[in-house]
Image (cartoon, rainbow, N blue to C red):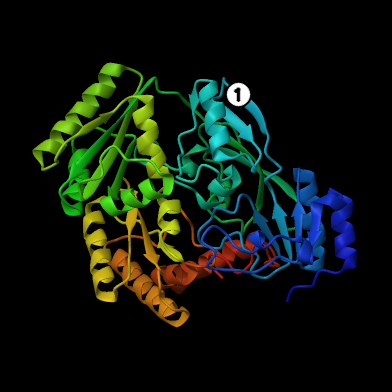
């Protein structure tokens, strides 16, 4: 189906980006064969480091003419194999397209290239008294990757997800054409939203080369609240009650004692409190100290009324850094505690979070496998990790498939979906297919065919 890279292809690629930016065969580091979890592995035939929309356009024109598969990669922090070149071919690395191009204070937008890191954009925005609200846990991910997976993060409860902050995209189509999707306008009812199709498409429809992103005024005050509970059930059950109180926290995270201990060990730093079984971590922000303090006190009082053991105010920079650095390290800490792991990134209605988490504990007991979790209790997005530990290859494959089957089936029963923010990629597409059914999958495949009739852009992902 696809043509193999030959010497002429290499010559064309080198003429576009220069010899130093084209790596072939054994010149490519094995790191490019997998993403963060590493469960899916395949080396690209050639790695091309790109620097501009025009370079990508020229490469895609050649790839389209020759029917060569192309996979786009940012920082490689994904967890479902989206950036793995499962069909080989060309891998385009966009990390050197890392410029912040414009800050438009009148329209509250910032224009960036896809290789800008989330932490760089967040720092830039705050330096200019703005907030870029999407806040995924992996701060070294690229903005292009965030847009491609419609990343959510911890502030989604109040501010929403990445899609809510993308005003416009410059994209290169699979045939090399350059298109502008969307604009800086606040409202748009002008036909189908092609921009929103590209967001969350995991690099299967078009290649993002620039993004115009919406900013918010930076809140002047922020405080966090760490609330211990005697067990996970009472911790999770507090979340719908908090939401019904009409206070909207910026973030509502849940965590267990085991996960906190992993993080303490990984970072070599103590968490403010780790003696209780379950915790809810909340953040409140706003433009007046009175409003922030009032909201925090309302929620603290409510939690204590319904069974919380305490309510610790996290208001100094040192305490905030201690708590949130530990929270941000949960994924790496769990990963460091085992030989291999895989993730179930389900999202369920908030009212069903407790039932789903209890079900994962039941699976862990029945299978004898360690299944730690943490996640965004405020929006029902759960990060559940199946740990291999000492299992041999055969047993690991059996247990992993069994656990995933049970968890995705339970999520569907509870009205949930396969992925809340990490995407489908290669690893989770069979579960999405089971849940959505053939008719919806065929609609997705029709969209893919309209954008990419030769199926050369990130083939084998999402709906194929």
Q: Is residue 213 visible?
A: no
| Position of residue 88 measured from the top left corner of the image (x, y, whole percent) | 70, 69
Look at mark 1 in the image and give the residue it sits on: 104
Image check: 41 left or right of 157? right
Q: Nearer the viewer, residue 307 or 271?
A: 271
Q: Is residue 42 visible?
A: yes
| Residue 287, image quadrant | top left
Image check: 62 left or right of 110? right
Image check: 313 left or right of 187? left
Please tell me which residue is depicted at 54% across the width and 64% down the height of the picture. 38
| Position of residue 6 measured from the top left corner of the image (x, y, whole percent) | 86, 69
Q: Residues within 10 Å of mark 1 (few under 14, many from 20)?
A: some
Q: Nearer the viewer, residue 208 or 283?
A: 283
Please tell me which residue is depicted at 51% across the width and 42% down the height of the picture. 139
* Image quadrant occupied by the N terminus: bottom right
Q: Nearer the viewer, residue 104 or 139?
A: 139
Image check: 419 left or right of 86? left
| Residue 417, image quadrant | bottom left
| Residue 382, image quadrant | bottom left
Task: Tell me if residue 324 comes above or below residue 449 in the rendering.
Answer: above
């Amino acid at each position: 189906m696809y043509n193999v890279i030959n010497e002429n292809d290499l010559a064309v690629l080198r003429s576009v980006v220069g010899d130093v930016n084209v790596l072939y065969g054994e010149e490519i580091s094995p790191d490019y064969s997998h993403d963060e979890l590493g469960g899916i592995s395949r080396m690209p035939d050639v790695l091309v480091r790109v620097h501009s929309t025009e370079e990508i356009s020229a490469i895609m024109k050649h790839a389209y003419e020759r029917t060569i598969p192309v996979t786009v990669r940012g920082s490689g922090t994904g967890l479902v194999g989206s950036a793995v070149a499962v069909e080989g071919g060309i891998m385009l690395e966009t990390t050197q397209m890392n410029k912040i191009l414009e800050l438009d204070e009148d329209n509250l937008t910032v224009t960036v290239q896809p290789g800008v890191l989330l932490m760089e954009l967040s720092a830039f925005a705050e330096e200019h008294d703005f907030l870029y609200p999407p806040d995924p846990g992996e701060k070294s991910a690229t903005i292009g990757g965030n847009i491609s997976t419609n990343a959510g993060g911890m502030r989604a409860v109040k501010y929403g997800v990445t899609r809510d902050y993308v005003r416009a995209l410059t994209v290169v189509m699979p045939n090399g054409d350059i298109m502008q999707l969307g604009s800086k306008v606040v409202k748009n009812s002008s036909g189908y939203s092609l921009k929103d199709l590209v967001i969350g498409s995991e690099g299967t429809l078009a290649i993002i080369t620039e993004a115009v992103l919406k900013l918010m005024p930076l809140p002047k005050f922020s405080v966090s609240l760490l609330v211990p509970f005697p067990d996970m059930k009472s911790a999770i059950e507090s979340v719908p009650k908090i939401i019904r109180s009409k206070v909207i926290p910026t973030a509502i995270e849940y965590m267990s004692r085991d996960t906190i201990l992993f993080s303490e060990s990984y970072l070599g730093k103590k968490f403010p409190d780790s003696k209780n079984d379950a915790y809810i971590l909340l953040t409140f922000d706003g433009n007046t100290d009175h409003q922030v303090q009032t909201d925090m006190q309302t929620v603290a009082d409510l939690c204590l009324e319904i069974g919380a053991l305490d309510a610790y105010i996290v208001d100094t920079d040192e305490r905030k850094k201690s708590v949130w650095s530990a929270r941000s390290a949960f994924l790496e800490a769990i990963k460091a505690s085992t030989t291999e792991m895989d993730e179930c990134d389900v999202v369920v209605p908030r009212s069903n979070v407790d039932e789903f988490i209890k079900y994962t504990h039941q699976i862990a007991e029945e299978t004898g496998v360690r299944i730690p979790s943490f996640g965004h209790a405020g929006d029902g997005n759960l990060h559940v990790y199946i740990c291999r530990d000492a299992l041999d290859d055969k047993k690991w494959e059996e247990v992993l498939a069994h656990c995933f089957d049970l968890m995705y089936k339970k999520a569907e029963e509870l009205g949930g979906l396969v992925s809340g923010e990490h995407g489908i990629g290669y690893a989770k597409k069979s579960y999405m297919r089971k849940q959505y059914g053939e008719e919806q999958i065929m609609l997705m495949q029709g969209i893919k065919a309209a954008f990419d009739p030769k199926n050369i852009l990130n083939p084998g992902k999402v709906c194929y």
